[in-house]
Image (cartoon, helix red, strand yellow):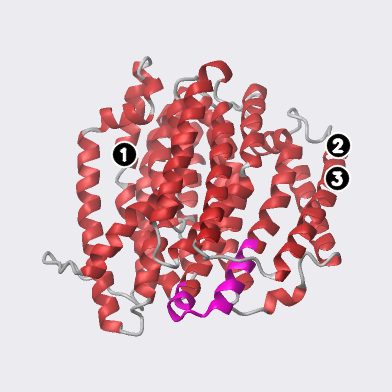
Amino acid sequence: MNLIKSTSTFSFFTIISRLLGYLRDILIAVFLGTGILADAFFVAFRIPNTFRRLFSEGTFNAAFVPSYSSLLNKKKEAQNFANSIFNLLTLGLIILVLIVEILMPLFVYLIAPGFEGDYDKMELAITLTRITFPFLIFISLASFFSAILNSHNKFAIASAAPIILNILLIGVLLFAKILDDNLVYYLSYAVTISGVVQFIFLYFFVKKNFSPKIKFKININKKIKNFFKKLLPSIFSSGVTQINILVGTIIASFQASAVSYLYYADRVYQINLAIAGIAIGTVILPQLSKYVKSQNKDKINLIQNKALELSLFLSIPATVALLIASEEIISSLFGYGSFDELSVKNSAKALFYFAIGLPAFSLIKVFSTFFFARHNTKIPFYISLLSVLLNIFISVIFFKQIGFIIIPIATTTSSWFNALLLFIFLKKESFFNFNHVFIDRLIKILTASVIMGIFFNYIIYFFNNELSYQENFKAIYLVGAVITGLIFYFFIAVLIKAFKRTDINLNY
């Protein structure tokens, strides 16, 4: 496996998906802004989208890939194991969705209790969530197919599937003026339809490696029991960032428009997290699991150090750029139509504090993968549980005094706490050791990021007028500034050897 090439393949389609996601969110910002319709839709969209992230962004892989990969040399046994998981997962999802659909008013109250005082907003959120929730069945099964493809080191198709969601939502948004207030209903239907399409799309490619067979009699053996024992902890631990964001959404529902502010801020830093954390964790898991099983300590050490190095190489400069230009970025991406200057300023404040936690969000994904490759989901689970409790404690204690801005602060604080504890336990269990190259590279990455930050700050200052809220073409200047800063960063990194061109061809 080539870490950089595999990560690049995964990241390429992820970036396309996120860019289409930005276009989608720009259109939503223009036509919905941050009012009642936007808040209700974002709650309805947040739930299935959180589950999508929990299942598709490496979490299902964490429980499935190590077990499935260990059986690949026994084809029939691997097929039976995967088929049993598929049938149990399908049955469980159908039951879960039916229960939630029946109890939807209670469910929406639990995830958006702040809507209770506004009857119209609550009723709209209930209706929209009923429409979007079946998405969970199809996207979870699609993620199961993705995990099988990833186990066979096929990352492109799985990472391309989420593009379908954004294409369908953009298609609906193009008719926004015609649909008017009915827009949120059509968007909600498009969410569920996209789940069906992704499921069919991935089935077409996975059937070469796995053909699901519906069976009512399922033999639940020791391996299947072990899988489901690992699944819940892995969902919680690998998806802790998304769970913290969901907790933030629940608390933010008590303040008007706060759900929308957090949603737009979340959208911006997620593109880097997808590459610096999710992509790297997903790509290394199958190979790392194999080396752990064969006890090849040299390969294990090399992969883990390179994964950590690459994660920081991508996340640290992104953090610097977001801290410098959070307001200009939000304004250029979403500051049009119904998305007014107050919305820009509030979303930018949230983005600033989320940005401080960006390296931690990425480290959680990478460090958790080191545990998952060893079939250990308990330690990340307990640490994540502590992290979520800390997040809730900080948010609830200070929300009345500070307002919605405490939510990104709490998420960032609890995420650094999570990353630090994961690292401590990795060292304690002797699962990770720095090699002699890493420290040298880290110093150089920090140096390159600081130099890039000074240069990027100058560019933002130079184009200050062109990036102001009133300008219609500010997004073009922002893209130009970001690309220039990125090229400059890579140039400095290569110059001071924070990154070597020979790394591109290095196999693991």
Residue at (81% x, 56% y) in the render:
448
Snapshot quadrant of residue 265: top right
**Which three-letter amino acid code belongs to the residue tagged 2?**
Tyr
In the picture shown, does residue 81 fall above or below 270?
Answer: below
In what element is the residue under mark 1? helix
Label 1 with label 3: CB-CB less than 8 Å: no
Q: Nearer the viewer, residue 193 or 135?
A: 135
Residue appearing at x 38%, y 16% in the figure: 118
* Circle 3 crowding by C-alpha within 10 Å: few under 14, some 14–19, many from 20: some
Q: Position of residue 28 (x, y in %)?
A: 53, 35
* Mark closer to the observer (3, 2): 3
Question: Residue 135, position in %: x, y?
Answer: 34, 48
Contact check, label 1 and label 2, Cβ < 8 Å: no
Q: Tell me the distance, in whole angstroms, between the alpha carbons under discs 1 and 2.
A: 45 Å
Tell whether position 295 is magenta.
yes
Between 398 and 170, the one lying in front of the other is 398
Determine the secondary structure under disc 3.
Answer: helix
Mark 2 sits on what residue?
461
Magenta stretch in the rendered image: 289-308
Give me the residue at 73% from left, 51% from top.
317
Labels 1 and 3: the sequence-earlier one:
1
Identify the residue position indicated by label 1 in the image.
Answer: 131
Amino acid at the residue labelled 1: Ile
Closer to us: 317 or 97:
317
On residue 454, which mark appears? 3
**Residue type for callout 3:** Ile
Secondary element type, mark 2: helix
Q: Position of residue 460 (x, y in %)?
A: 82, 40
Which residue appears at 55% of the width and 74% of the height? 300
